[in-house]
Image (cartoon, rainbow, N blue to C red):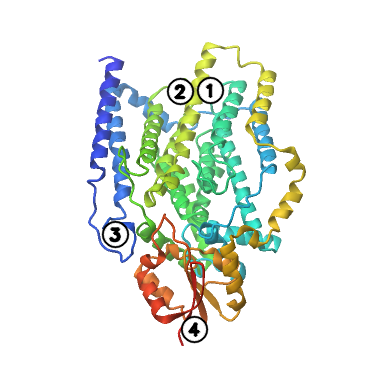
Amino acid sequence: MNFQKKNLILYSIVLISLGISVFLWDKILLPFKNPEIIGVYTQQEYHSLNDPIRYLVFISLPLLTWLIGYIYFYNSKFNKFIYNFNNREIFLYKKNNFTNFTFLLIIFFLILEFLSLNFPINKLDLVHDGQQLSSAYRNYLDNSLWSNSYVIVGIFHETLNASFVWKIFNEISIGYFRYSILIYLFIFKILLLILIYKTSDVLKFNDSLKSIYLFLSSILILSLSDYAVYSSDQISYREIPVLLGLILITNIFTKSKYLNLSIIILSLLSFPSLLWGIDRGIVYNLILLSLIFYFLIIKDHKKTIIISVSLFSSWFVFYLFLHDEFYYFIINTYNIITEASYIHGIIHPIPFTSELNSGRATKTLLSILICLIFSIKLFFNSNKKFSNSFKFILLYIALASFLTYINALARSDGPHIKSTFGYPLIFFTLLILNLLLFYLDSKFKNIFVHKNKIFILFIILCLLNFDLSFNKISKYNERLNNFINLPDQSFLKNKEIELLSKVSPIVNNYECIQLFSNNAAILYLLRSKSCSKYYFIWGLGSKKDQKDLEKYLNNKNLIIYGGDDFNWDMPVSKKLTYLNDFILENYILLFEVDNYKVLEKKN
């Protein structure tokens, strides 16, 4: 049977298996058990594990079909797969002066771009900004972590980020908080560039071609994320721990002198990755777990021991350092993992249908499947075009693509699905540019040898691609000082200023304020602490947790009730019916401002 016929049969079978996956999607239904949480899932008696299982079936069925079929039709290549999979250290980094210079050139323009930024003076998002500001203010007051804040995303993202900046500069402001986000975005772009740089270094190209590859892939990949803090990108700065993991993995799959050190650092970051964000930390640790399995498969016991000891050390040190907060972390994280989908989950659309966001989800799912197939297929081929190091880098980027989509399963709206498309785009960019330059080099040997001309072209393209303003750069310190010293009112709408003006005079008469509103920023704006750890009640759902909050309500607190409703979630009063009934029965109205009600307990 010839090559074309084999491929036609193989990919026809894969398409059939993909069709079966789509057919099975809405047939997978686990028995529902009411968790006493009101949300989209419970309203439709929908088990929270339905979507993850559907996702696994959708990806694994055509992937396994392709793998079995490929081995059957091309069994002669299986030995090549075994050889490549076991031979991780075939490439040695070489000194590439022009590539290094290109890397520094892009770094230079990234710095100029950062110094040219307009600072974000958008009106405050009382929900998402408030999620970070109010928890950070509580930490600023008493240094508490999970014990006094029910953390939904991650303690660093939600609490320590703003608090850390305020403590450094001994000043609290929204400007400092927003500036810290810009810094993380800048670090994120640098990490993306480092990943691309380390990938380009393992290509089977000369120095000039590596530089072109580095430059072109950087221009394309860095454009996936911008400094518009309130826009939804294909990839977010919250991926920093996963990116760090991928960068360290590039050292593991080369003859790098930092191999063991990279393994140790990768393992030590296991626990800190969860502090950054629970969702990204889970992805990071699953990637780390896959590395352990890899070393077990190839029987590299030394590396397995290094990872295991470093991993245990990471958790043990933080256990000793955090004391009681470690137990609060475990309880908090367990509750988020088991309850979050029921609280604010949105059922994932069926692929290839007209359901809302189905097109975006289908595009991303197919991209992930293609990434996985291509990354595995490369190991069946010779190393003429691709070094083994490059193959392993692509394999782990494909794995990151697969695992990151879990974040879109818990809340399957447009922005969350969009933010998982970045890793597939990085994968395709790195792979296609490699193939394209390999082809051009084989056809036109002499067009990539003039380094001076290439460098001048790089400079011109950088000037065109990066948003630079030398006037803004020259006035950067002045602009920054003005921004970080802006008063809170500069970021507020009139109705929010009115609320603060009426509530602020009476705040000192009460020990604390309890919000019965998703607008968590109110606590920060009033410089008041929450009466309970549930400062952001969007993460509150179960009857057990509602009763837990009730214990903190007494004659010494105010309740701020209501605020705007949002089309992306049902009203708080409908989600937290037990707590709502308790408040309406035991509290009286002091006054109203716009959609807010300020309540105090009856005598």
Q: Position of residue 163 (x, y in %)?
A: 61, 62
> Residue sitting at 47 percent across and 20 percent down?
384
Lower sequence index among marks 4 and 1: 1
Label 1 near label 3: C-beta < 8 Å?
no
Q: CA distance from mark 3 to mark 1?
A: 56 Å
Lower sequence index among marks 2 and 1: 1
Q: CA distance from mark 4 to mark 3?
A: 35 Å
Which amino acid lies under the numbered mark 4 shown in the image of this protein? Asn
Secondary structure type for disc 3: helix
Residue 204 got which mark?
1
Which amino acid lies under the numbered mark 1 shown in the image of this protein? Lys
Which amino acid lies under the numbered mark 3 shown in the image of this protein? Gln
At label 3, counting other C-alpha atoms closer than 10 Å, the crowd grade (few under 14, some 14-19, many 20 or more) is few
Label 1 near label 2: C-beta < 8 Å?
yes
Secondary structure type for disc 4: loop
Residue 14 in sight in this render: yes
Q: Closer to us: mark 4 or mark 1?
A: 4
At label 4, counting other C-alpha atoms closer than 10 Å, the crowd grade (few under 14, some 14-19, many 20 or more) is few
Residue 555 got which mark?
4
Secondary structure type for disc 1: loop
Q: CA distance from mark 2 to mark 4?
A: 74 Å
Residue 138 in sight in this render: no
Q: Which residue is mark 3?
A: 43
Q: Position of residue 160 (x, y in %)?
A: 58, 60
- Counting every numbered tag in the picture gives 4
> Residue sitting at 29 percent across and 51 percent down?
50
Lower sequence index among marks 2 and 4: 2
Snapshot quadrant of residue 577: bottom left
Q: Which residue is mark 2?
A: 383
Q: CA distance from mark 2 to mark 1?
A: 9 Å
